[in-house]
């Protein structure tokens, strides 16, 4: 038999809560963009190799 009370809403777990976005929390500068581009060089090379194999 129900008691007539509504169940309490469940709180979202920490994994479900939104996290601050580091991309918009920092200003875009030439230096940070250059560092980001340089950090992705190996990924771009791997993607280019994969693309070349498909052709």
Image (cartoon, rainbow, N blue to C red):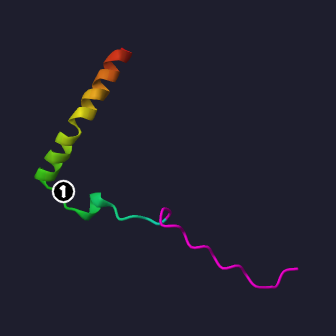
Depth check: 55 or 16 in front?
16
As drawn, 52 above or below 40: above
Q: Position of residue 19 (x, y in %)?
A: 39, 64
- In the rendered image, the quadrant that contains the C terminus is top left
Quadrant assignment, res 47: top left
Q: Position of residue 31 (x, y in %)?
A: 11, 51
Residue at 34% of width from left, 22% of height from top? Answer: 50
* Label 1 Cα crowd, 10 Å radius (few <14 / some 14-19 / many 20+): few
As drawn, 34 above or below 25: above
In the rendered structure, the answer to whether residue 40 lies left or right of residue 15 reads left
As drawn, 16 above or below 45: below
Quadrant assignment, res 3: bottom right
Please check the rendered image and state whether residue 8 is part of the magenta-colored stretch, yes or no.
yes
Residue at 50% of width from left, 63% of height from top? Answer: 16
Depth check: 5 or 24 in front?
5
> Mark 1 — residue?
28
Q: Position of residue 41 (x, y in %)?
A: 21, 35
In the rendered structure, the answer to whether residue 8 lies left or right of residue 55 reads right
**Which residue lies most toward the left here?**
31
Count of numbered circles on the image = 1
Q: Which residues are magenta?
A: 1-16
Residue at 63% of width from left, 76% of height from top? Answer: 9
Please check the rendered image and state whether residue 4 is part of the magenta-colored stretch, yes or no.
yes
Residue at 14% of width from left, 55% of height from top? Answer: 29
**Main SS of the magenta segment?**
loop
In the rendered structure, the answer to whether residue 1 lies left or right of residue 48 reads right
Q: Position of residue 26 (x, y in %)?
A: 22, 62
- In the rendered image, the quadrant that contains the N terminus is bottom right
**Which residue lies most toward the right here?**
1
Q: Secondary structure at mark 1?
A: loop
């Amino acid at each position: 038999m129900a008691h007539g009370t509504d169940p309490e809403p469940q709180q979202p777990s920490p994994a479900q809560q939104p996290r601050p976005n580091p991309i918009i929390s920092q200003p875009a500068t030439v230096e940070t963009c250059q560092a980001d581009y340089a950090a992705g060089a190996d990924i771009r090379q791997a993607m280019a190799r994969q693309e070349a194999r498909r052709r």
